[in-house]
Image (tube, rainbow, N blue to C red):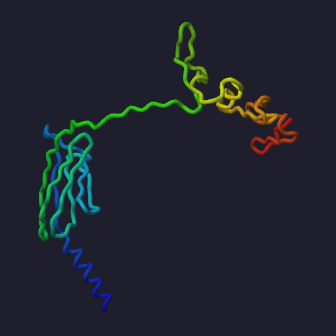
Amino acid sequence: MIYLGIVIGFVGQAFGQKSIIKGQISSEKNEPIIGANVILTGTVRGVQTNSKGEYILKGLSSGSYTVEVSFLGFRSKKMTVELSENQTSTVNFLLEEGLTLGEVTVLTSRGIRGNETLSETKDYSIFAGKKNEVIKLDNINANLAMNNSRQIFGRTPGISVWENDGSGIQLGVASRGLSPNRSWEFNVRMNGYDITP
């Protein structure tokens, strides 16, 4: 019996929510604003305007609602609407263009790797269509008095660098795979086939 009372209460409440808020959003030039956000403040209800700038919020219960409209490049507007049972309320909005800009901050940084790209042409040389990345040593946070090769090879994709003696003086460099000096036994397979010499 209690279960039946709960079900009837929910059904009655669902049938009681028949109020509607609808309208059109347009600009100062009387052009419809397509895709404007229309939300009921304090609820999870919201829609976007269609290709004619129209919106409709259905299934609302009676009460007071604050309708907020926003769109990129325009100032947001709010309007309060009082709804009674089974009422359709038309609320149109005319949005003004937002011309105020906030503070603009320009940040710059340099890459960790110190890589740059050459211009396509310089003097009589053409670099377009070629591998044109350059490692600039003055852009690298590193010890430039020693181990320039280590700093350069360590920033190049596809190249592995390791120390032979632990002091950083003797370097081992391997490109495109494993170095035979680094390991006495290695096994390289491609598509399931052994390709080691």
Q: Quadrant of the C terminus?
A: top right
> Is the residue 173 above or below the residue 91 in the image?
above
Occupied quadrant, residue 169? top right
- Which percent across, then down, holds residue 67? 19, 57
Q: Which residue lies furthest to the bottom in this view?
A: 1
Furthest residue to the top? 124
Q: Which residue is drawn at 14% across and 55% down?
A: 79
Q: In this view, does 105 lie above or below 71?
A: above
Q: Quadrant of residue 72?
A: top left
Q: In terms of depth relative to the viewer, which is nearer, 97 or 92?
A: 97
Residue 90 horizontal side relative to residue 39, left or right: left
Which residue is found at the position 36% from the left and 34% from the top? 105
Task: Give 56 or 43, whichever is nearer the viewer.
Answer: 43
Q: Which residue is drawn at 17% across and 53% down?
A: 78
Q: Is the residue 191 above or below the residue 16 in the image?
A: above
**Left or right of residue 28: residue 14:** right
Residue 160 sits in quarter = top right
| Residue drawn at x 21%, y 75% as measured from the top left | 15
Q: How many marks?
A: 0
Q: Position of residue 7 (x, y in %)?
A: 29, 83
Residue 103 horizontal/vertical position (percent): 30, 36
Picture coordinates of residue 113, whole percent (x, y): 59, 31
Q: Quadrant of the N terminus?
A: bottom left
